[in-house]
Amino acid sequence: MVHRLIVQYGQPTDPAAFDRHYREVHVGLAQAIPGLQRFTIGHPRSMDPSTPAPYLVAELDFESADALAKGMGSEAGAAAGADVATFATGGASMASYDVDDVSPAG
C-alpha cells in the first residue's frame, strides 16, 4: 500500500522567488529522501471562489508509513524539512495517509 505525504504551501510574499527556489533547490533535496517512490507538485485552483487554494501542493509517496518516517528521519529528510523555512513565507502544512484506491474498475 502507498503512504502519501501531502505538503500544502500558503501564498508566498514573492511567488517568483518561491518557484525558483522550489525548483532549483527544494526539489533536489526532496528527491534525495530515502524511500521516496513518487513526487508530484501542482498549483491548484480553488473550485470555490470564496475559499483560496494553497499556492502549491506537493505529494510524496512512500511504500509505507514506516518508510515515510525513516525517510523523513534521515539526513536528507532533515535537510528538506529545514529548507522549508528558507522559502515558504506563506507557511506550510503537512499531512500523511495510506492511499486507498477507490477508482472504478475498468
Image (tube, rainbow, N blue to C red):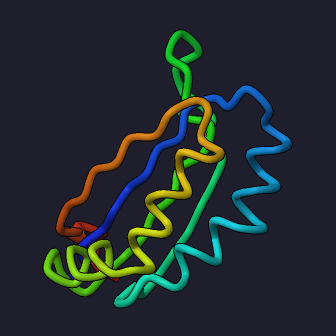
Query: How many labels were placed on the picture?
Result: 0
Q: Image point 78% across, 68% down: which residue? A: 24
Image quarter of the C terminus: bottom left
Residue 14 point in image, percent of width and height: 79, 32
User: In front: 60, or 80?
Assistant: 80
Residue 47 point in image, percent of width and height: 54, 28
Q: Is 50 displayed left or right of 65 in the figure?
A: right
User: In front: 13, or 2?
Assistant: 13
Residue 17 point in image, percent of width and height: 82, 44
Q: Is 35 displayed left or right of 7 in the figure?
A: left
Q: Residue furthest left?
A: 66
User: In front: 52, or 79?
Assistant: 79
Q: Image point 23% across, 67% down: which residue? A: 102
Image quarter of the N terminus: bottom left
Residue 100 point in image, percent of width and height: 19, 68
Q: Is 106 displayed left or right of 18 in the figure?
A: left
Q: What is the quadrant of residue 42 in the picture?
A: bottom right
Q: Image point 55% across, 57% down: which residue? A: 83
Q: Image point 73% across, 26% down: which residue? A: 13
